[in-house]
Amino acid sequence: MSDEARHAENDDAQRAAFLVEACQRIRDQVGKIVVGQDDVIEQLLIAILARGHCLLEGVPGLAKTLMVRSLAESMELSFRRIQFTPDLMPADITGTDIIQVDSTTGHRQLIFEKGPVFTQMLLADEINRTPPKTQAALLEAMQEHEVTVGGKTYRLDEPFFVLATQNPIEQEGTYPLPEAQRDRFLFHVVVDYPSRDEESEIIDRTTSSFQTRLEPVVTGLEMITCQETVRLVPLPDHVKDFVLDLVRAARPNDDRALPWVSELIEWGPGPRASQQLVLASKARAVLRGRHHVTIDDALALALPVLRHRIVPTFNAEAEGISVDDLITRLLKELPRADPRVL
């Protein structure tokens, strides 16, 4: 190995070590405020490292908002929260041009007043409570990291993340997210109830004089460096083949789909699912101190990556088969190549 190659390898190893250390510091800070939810916090960190957005689903009172705010504070990122309501307008998110009068000349001019989307970490609270027109105002921001108003395009600050929440129990007065917008989210994370011990700790912290303060332990620029590190992780061919086989097996019109898929799946995931499962798997691998991706990484993240990208058929819904059940069956029945014979 040449000196130049050895130096590059050492540099990559140092960057990976910094990423692991930075994420551990973030976890420690968030743990001062949020009790439990370790898997959810890890998935949020993976989404951020993969430059993705997250959709959090859970009943009220599970600290979803607190979790997102704590992440922003620990990473020294600007944070804004939008409470989505039926009367929210697109301009309430993106901003709008307003007329201002110059006090010295008396001339009127249009000035762009930035909306709350101009932040680094945006919490879209109960995103399914606003009509599709307003939901769509986030599409350009999520995909292009920019906003166009009045024919002018404005770039958003980097890093930029959208973490949206939705309540699964109150369906009246809600507007399900269209497939195009759901596909923009890297993960659909289900936030579950805490364990008994965790809930006991929550009671102790919130009904006493317990106080703590979060400290920023990572900067936004350092997180951008960590995102670049994730993309340098090599992807073995057998892992890429597994991701391709998994995603394509969930499409009812694909030649390699499993026999039962056309009966139970109406629409399968698109190419963005493959891309984002690979990126998320790379981030997970680095967080676990590895410089390569394994099939186990893809298996661990298949549910949050695919559950919002698969539409079950009427037959599946009538039989009480959930999307998670379909993904679990796919993972169980999909053949896997042995990397030792490749």
Image (cartoon, rainbow, N blue to C red):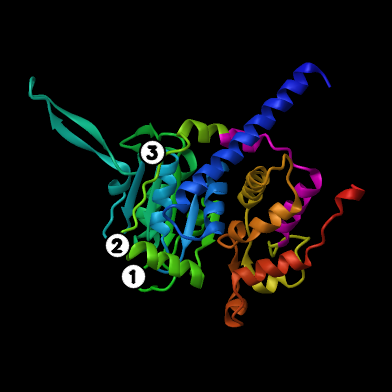
Residue 191 lies, with reference to residue 284, above or below; the image says: below
Amino acid at the residue labelled 1? Gly
Q: Is residue 232 magenta?
A: yes
Tag 3 near tag 2, CB within 8 Å: no
Label 3 vs label 2: CA separation? 22 Å
For the point 33% across and 70% down, which residue is it? 173
- x and y percent of residue 256 in the render? 78, 60
> For the view shown, which residue lies furthest in the right direction?
341
Residue 272 seen in the figure: yes
Residue 260, quarter of the rendered image: bottom right
Between 228 and 277, the residue placed more toward the observer is: 228
Pointer 3: residues within 10 angstroms few (<14), some, or many (20+)? many
Tag 2 near tag 1, CB within 8 Å: yes
Name the residue carrying label 2: 86
Pointer 1: residues within 10 angstroms few (<14), some, or many (20+)? few
Where disc 1 sits, the SS reads: loop
Where disc 2 sits, the SS reads: loop
Name the residue carrying label 3: 147
